[in-house]
Every structure is written in structure tokens, then in C-alpha cells.
Amino acid sequence: MLGLSKKDTTFLLIVIFLTMATPILLQPFPEGSAMATFNAGYPDLMQRFAIFGIFAIGFNILFGLTGYLSFGHAAFLGVGSYSVVWMYKLLDYNVLPGLVLAIITSGIFALAIGYISLRRTGIYFSILTLAFAQMSFNLAYSVLTPLTNGETGLQVYTDDPQILMGENAPNVPHLFGLVMRDSYQLDLGGWLFTFNIGYYFCAVIAILAFYLSLRIFRSPFGMMLRAIKTNQTRLNYTGLNARPYTLAAFVISGMYAGLAGGLLAAMDPLAGAERMQWTASGEVILMTILGGAGTLMGPVLGAGFIKYFENIFSKINDTMLHGWFGWMPDGIEDAILFVSHFFVGKSWHLTLGLMFMLVVIFLPGGLVEGAQRIGRLFRRRGRKAGGPEAEAARQRNPGPAE
Amino acid sequence: MGILEVKDVNKRFGGLQALGDVNLSVAEGSVHAIIGPNGAGKSTLLNCLVGKLIPDTGSVMFAGQSVLGRKPHEINQLGISRVFQTPEIFADLTVMENVLIPCFAKRDGAFRLHAFETVANETEIGEQAEAMLADVNMLEKRDMVAASLSRGDKRRLEMAMSMVQQPKLLLLDEPTAGMARADTNNTIDLLRQIHNKRDITMCIIEHDMHVVFSLAQRITVLAQGTPLVEDTPENIKGHPKVREAYLGEAH
Ligand SMILES: Nc1ncnc2c1ncn2[C@@H]1O[C@H](COP(=O)(O)OP(=O)(O)O)[C@@H](O)[C@H]1O
Ligand SMILES: [Mg+2]
């Protein structure tokens, strides 16, 4: 189906199901219970899962397949956001023109930056991309203020032209009238599920993005990209020109980043230069490696993990900790609280850092490799391993598709 | 006129004259061997043919076109494939993928954005690759990761990758180095079979006289970067200068 093998079709269907059911799956604890903090099924966070999932899927096409480590992909994220907000300012709050523009402008940016950076490989390539991204970041704050509105960030003002703005058109981002921030809430005996239009919009695009990446992974083009990673010398003497292949991968992944940046502005009509900072580029690298570079699902998992930690662990405060551990004797509770302070709240980065270290040391293939090992364990015990693990296991070395 | 014409090629590495006034003509359809002691400049000569090195002076013509100044992938697209002295393969990919890539390179040229096609659906290319793997007796290893192959299998895989492109000229740099006797004989058979079946001109660098005399129709002896003699295997065997410079010392 859709040009996919049977296995890949099943895999895609599972991904679609999981994405569609996210508002339910991420809300396992009843409202008001002690564990409700760990619920992640609220619109803002779910949108981030989908958007950064797209960002990481695109980054993985470059880094996971070719091995070229870009340190500047945040620049494209920023370009995408600015494009969307400009379309709000000039046309109206419909997100579609902005997203199309976001993909085009980030593609052009990526073509220019990639054309120059790809003259070098390895660390020099990474440094060049980093330099370009930091340059964009600084320009956005200084010379390009007319385009970016500098430190304030780009936003829509009442005196903006908005030439397509109709009489009753929504005054917030929407898709032909479907307002992104609108949600439908379902209260089921203590459980509260939120079905948000913005999330489902991002989710559909994320699924398309994932499908495209799946096709690229299985295509001759994708095979060439993997060949570049393993032996560029052999590739050259086999009659293939590595440069246009890497450039195409760079542009495609830049467009993914631009789309992700555009979606950020489609959810929240604001674009700031901080989105282009190198920390944002570093984050997508962490996501990809944590999840499993070069695998299909890895980057999505990595993006989900990091966004979950950022939003959930950082929210945990003393009152909550007291709520959980208050029943313990005072001395022990104090000790636990003291230790916890290093890992939750503002210190959530430490938890993430430790996790990252553990994964890199013990699971060089990322979380996907973890899932893979668990899958194998089950199979060895003679039980039938199915579902995502088996699929994940297959991804790192896709056999011949039947 | 041979398919490959090397004229007055010189190459220096600092103070070392690696190639001095090399002239070589490889006739179309022949197997031409280049022999010579270690450090004679054999690999350097091959490097000058495939664009890895640029000679200081001289010309290299292939099928009427100069290869000098062309990039390696352009030279391959002209029809020259090369097997390296230490195998260069796509170690992280499967054996089958290793052979598929040169097939795509042959069909689609140096670059094509075939991002929306599926490798598994390219039946014609798949069959081509499978036939080649069958020829080198590696079909049952098609799904193995190339890095896990034995040394001999890696060499055979690299030969398969070069031969599947049906090049006009196949350059082989010591294809049997480090192989056991039985493997060497298999390789000789394989090369002979490929030569006859696919009519590929071959230029082969070899240390092993057994291989050279089994395959070659012409032999060039290289010593210290300069061709000593060029002749048929029968005449080379009895040539006093060669015995003295090379055969006597090696065997
Ligand atoms: N890239 C290089 N830089 C410097 N010297 C080299 C280089 N390549 C080969 N040489 C030298 O040139 C000579 C010929 O080398 P080579 O062509 O590899 O010999 P052969 O393949 O006949 O054994 C050797 O002395 C070698 O050390
Ligand atoms: Mg050599």
C-alpha cells in the first residue's frame, strides 16, 4: 500500500494509531491524583511532541543517514517561524500560506548554507553550520530587525495589512476557520482527555513527514546516503558524486526544520530569534542520538523523551515532592527531597544529561536499540514478539522488503 | 591504439620519483598485467588512471578522451572501474546493497534524486545484482553486513561491485593478495570467466606469478617507476633482464 512493503505498511499504521491516540495514551492518570503531574496529554505539550518529532525526523535524514552532523539546524527552525508570522501580517491568520512559505524559504536557506558547508566534512562541516546559524541568530537581533522585530520578536499588530482578512475570520491562527487553539474535552469519570485541533493538525503533518522519511529510507537515494556514511571513497570510485546527494539531504532536512519552525508559529503566533540559537541545534542532535540515529522511530522517541522531561520533570516542586513522600519519617523525607532537588524542577537537565550518558554508553543505538533488545529477549523466550519492538528491531538493518 | 594510452607519465613524491616516463598501451579486450617488486609504483600508476592522483607530466587517454583533471566519479562513468589493494566496500551495508549501488550508478549516472522510488521494487537491477552475486558464489550471503565478511569475501565482493558495472576497463590492484591458494585459484577462474563472458578489458597488478601467467596476454614489468619491458607471458618468462630484476628475487 502507498508504495510500501507489507511490513512497512503495518509499521506506518501503528505509528498513525499511536499518534491519533496520543491524547488518550498520554493521560493515564486520573485528574487530581498524585500522579497527574506525569500526564502529558495537554495540547501545548502534545503539539511540541509532534513538532519536534518532525524536526528530528528531518535532522535524521541528514545526520542519521549521511553522518554529516549539522550544528546549525535551528537556523531553519527560526526561518520557518518568521515566514509564518509574516504571512499572518501580510495576508491573514490562515496557517497554510505561511507553512508553504516556511518550507520554501528554509529550503533556499539550506541550499545556500549547505552549498558552502558541504565543501568540508567531519568537524569542519559541523563548525561551518554552527557559524552560519550563529550568524543568522545575531543578524536576526541586529541588522535584520526590520524583518525580525529584534528582541521583541515578530508578532502581528493591529495596523498590519492582513489583506485577506475577512469580516468574521478568526483573530488567531486557523486552517480555513478551524482554530488551532480550540479543543474538545472529554471527561470520563475522573479522566480528562483533551482533543486539540492544533495537535491533530501537527499530528497529520507529522505522519506525512514520517511517511516521506520512510520512503526515503527505502529508496535508492536513501541507500546512497547510507553509502556516503560508510565509505565515501568507494562511492566516488563507483561513479557517484557524493556532493549533490549530501546537498539534497541537507536541503530536505532543512525543509523539515523550516516546517517544524512554521508549525511552532502556527500554534502560537510569535517568532523570536532565540529559536535560532545553538542550544536549539544541540537539542535536536540530542533527540536524534538519544532515540537512535539512523533509525526511523528513534528521532521521534528522542524528541518525545526530551520534551517530556523538559515539561514534566521541570514542573515538579517541593509541594509535590512533599505530597509523595510526606508519609515517610521526617529525616528520610528530607534526605529524599535533598537528593531529588538535583534531578527535578530546575535541575531536570541533570536527569536528562545522565540519561543521555547512560544511553550513549550502554545503548549506542539509542532507545530504539533498547526496545530492540527487549524485543529479542521476548523472542528468545519463545513468546511472540510483535508490535513496535519487532518493527524497531528491523529498522536498523532493513532486510529485503517482501 | 589501445583503449588505454599512457604517455610519458611522471609522478614525484617529494624527492622520490615514483613514476618515471611511463608508457603503457592496453589493447581493447585483452588482459594486461603489470608486475614489479614492492614500491615499483604500480599502485601509483593506477591512482593516476582513476583520478586519485594527477601526474606531474604526461597524458592518460581512455577511449580517446583524456582522464586527467576529471574527478574519480566522472572517470568511473567513462567506464573505468577499480578494485583496490585493500578492499574498499560499504562495510555497514549488506552484501546485496553493496552490489546494488554500482548498478544504480551505472543506470542513473553520478546523481539522481530517486527519493520516492523503492529499492525493493527495482526488479531489473535486483536481478542484475543477484546474477553477479551468483557468479562470485556469494548469493547466500546477500543479507550479511559486509563488515562481517572474511577478507577473501570482501575482495570478491569488491570485484563483484566493479564487474557488475560492465566497465570498459577493469583495474585490479593485487586481487589475490592475502588469499589462500584455493581462493586464489577461484579468483583466477572467476576473472577468466568474467573476461570471457562479459568481454571486459582488464588491467591487473599482481605479485603472484601464477595468477599473472594464468590470465595475462601482455605483461609490463615495472621497476623503480619505469617500465622495464613489455611482452607476452612466454617471452617475459625467459627474459634475462626480468629474471634478474624481478623473478629471481621474488621466487
Ligand atoms: N601518497 C604518497 N606519498 C608519498 N609517497 C608515496 C605515496 N604513494 C606511494 N608513495 C611511494 O611511492 C612508491 C611507489 O609506491 P606504490 O605505487 O604503492 O608501489 P607498489 O604498488 O608498486 O608496491 C613507494 O616508495 C611509496 O612509498
Ligand atoms: Mg601497491
Image: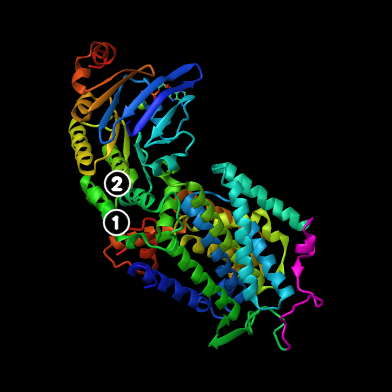
Mark 2 vs mark 1: tell me if same chain. yes
| Of residues B157 and B79, the one drawn nearer to the viewer in this rendering | B79
In the figure, A18 relative to A80: above or below? below
Left or right: A53, with B102 as reference point: right
The kind of residue on which mark 1 rests is: Gly
Q: Which residue is labeled 1 in the image?
A: B126
In the figure, A252 relative to A241: above or below? below
Q: Which quarter of the figure has residue A275?
A: bottom right
Q: Residue furthest front?
A: B1
In the figure, A6 relative to A162: above or below? above
Badge 2 element: loop
Stretch in magenta:
A142-167
> Is residue A72 shown to the viewer in this render?
no
Q: Looking at the image, tell me whether mark 2 or mark 1 is earlier in sequence order.
A: 1
In the figure, B7 relative to A48: above or below? above
| Badge 1: chain ID | B
Magenta stretch, overall SS: loop
| Of residues A106 and A10, the one drawn nearer to the viewer in this rendering | A106
Residue A160 percent coordinates (x, y):
79, 75
Q: Which residue is labeled 2 in the image?
A: B164
